[in-house]
């Protein structure tokens, strides 16, 4: 990887986390981390080639991340 583009990976990771958190909280509730089914889902998800398809995301954009950041600033 080119050292000049490593920040792209961080941003993509933050965007991915935003989508995954939204999906998991909608599916398993805000206390998803104590839900056994959420744990099973996450273990299965890590084995998937494209996890976006499994959480219903067709196109990735930064809007969700931006909304999260702005919401945390307010």
Image (cartoon, rainbow, N blue to C red):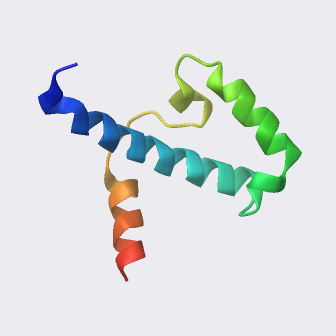
Residue 63 or residue 9, whichever sits in front: 9
Residue extending furthest toward the bottom: 74
Q: Is residue 7 left or right of residue 56?
A: left
Q: Is residue 58 left or right of residue 55?
A: left
Instruction: State whether residue 62 is above or below residue 9.
Output: below
Number of marks:
0
* Residue in the image at 72% along x and 51% along y: 27
Could you tell me which quadrant the N terminus lies in? Answer: top left
* Residue in the image at 71% along x and 63% along y: 30
Examine the image and state in which quarter residue 74 appears: bottom left
Instruction: State whether residue 24 is above or below residue 41.
Output: below
Instruction: State whether residue 60 is above or below residue 26.
Output: above
Instruction: State whether residue 72 is above or below residue 11.
Output: below
x, y percent for residue 48 = 61, 19
Residue extending furthest toward the front: 3
* Residue in the image at 45% along x and 41% along y: 16
Residue 23 or residue 31, whichever sits in front: 31
x, y percent for residue 45 = 66, 28
Examine the image and state in which quarter residue 68 appears: bottom left
Residue extending furthest toward the right: 36
x, y percent for residue 14 = 40, 47
* Residue in the image at 73% along x and 29% along y: 43
x, y percent for residue 72 = 41, 74
Examine the image and state in which quarter residue 39 appears: top right
Q: Is residue 58 left or right of residue 26?
A: left
């Amino acid at each position: 990887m080119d050292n000049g583009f490593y920040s792209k990976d961080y941003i993509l990771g933050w965007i991915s986390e935003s989508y995954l958190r939204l999906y998991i909280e909608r599916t398993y509730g805000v206390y998803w981390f104590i839900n056994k089914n959420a744990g099973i889902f996450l273990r299965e998800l890590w084995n998937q080639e494209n996890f976006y398809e499994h959480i219903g995301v067709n196109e990735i954009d930064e809007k969700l991340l931006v909304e999260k950041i702005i919401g945390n600033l307010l």
